[in-house]
């Protein structure tokens, strides 16, 4: 029976994410990711065709978490009140609490690490970032219009 490689893939992504936020995507080598994740080149290339593919996977995972947070906060805010203005206030309180926690745990933003080096990142990876940012904007604009 084939083994589930998901834990190895996640370990690589976790290590790469930390390194990219600290160093930037360009300065993060595959070898550094291998060292930090404790994996082999064979395992890396089993999961990612290239460093660019790793970068794309990092951004996709980050964007998915970002959008999950947006929808979770909005759902919680909407459950707390029927008034769109109160929902916005509740949403902002939830965001403020999370931002303070994230700032304590993380030293930077994965999006920023990629956008700063956008000339070195493929267009489909930048499209993921743009899509996530637009989703936040559209969701909040819709709520502002309701208020």
Image: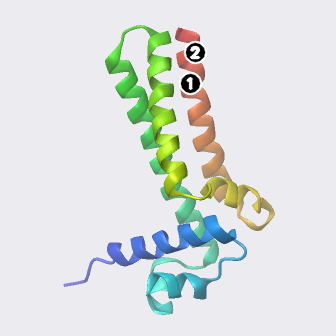
Q: Secondary structure at mark 1?
A: helix
Mark 2, other Cα within 10 Å: few <14 / some 14–19 / many ≥20: few
Labels 1 and 2 touching (C-beta < 8 A):
yes
Mark 1, other Cα within 10 Å: few <14 / some 14–19 / many ≥20: some
In the image, which disc is placed on residue 144? 2
Image position of 17 with respect to 133: above or below: below
Task: Measuring from the top left, give residue 29's x and y in whole percent.
Answer: 65, 82
Task: Measuring from the top left, give residue 102's x and y in whole percent.
Answer: 50, 49
Q: What residue does disc 1 label?
A: 140
Image position of 84 with respect to 128: above or below: above
Q: Secondary structure at mark 2?
A: helix
Residue at 28% across / 77% down in the picture? 4
Task: Measuring from the top left, give residue 140's x and y in whole percent.
Answer: 56, 24
Residue at 57% across / 34% down in the picture? 136
Which residue is more in the foreground, 58 or 131? 58
| Distance Cα–Cα, label 1 vs label 2 | 6 Å
In the image, which disc is placed on residue 77? none
Place residue 30 in its image quadrant.
Answer: bottom right
């Amino acid at each position: 029976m084939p083994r589930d490689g998901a834990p190895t893939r996640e370990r690589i992504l976790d290590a790469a994410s930390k390194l990219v936020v600290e160093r930037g995507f360009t300065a993060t080598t595959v070898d550094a990711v291998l060292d930090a994740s404790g994996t082999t080149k064979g395992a890396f290339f089993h999961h990612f065709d290239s460093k660019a593919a790793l970068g794309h996977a990092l951004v996709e995972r980050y964007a998915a978490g970002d959008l999950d947070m947006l929808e979770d906060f909005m759902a919680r805010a909407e459950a707390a009140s029927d008034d769109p203005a109160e929902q916005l206030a509740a949403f902002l309180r939830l965001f403020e609490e999370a931002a303070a926690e994230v700032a304590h745990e993380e030293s930077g933003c994965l999006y920023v690490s990629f956008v700063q080096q956008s000339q070195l990142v493929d267009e489909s990876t930048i499209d993921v970032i743009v899509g996530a940012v637009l989703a936040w904007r559209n969701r909040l604009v819709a709520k502002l219009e309701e208020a």
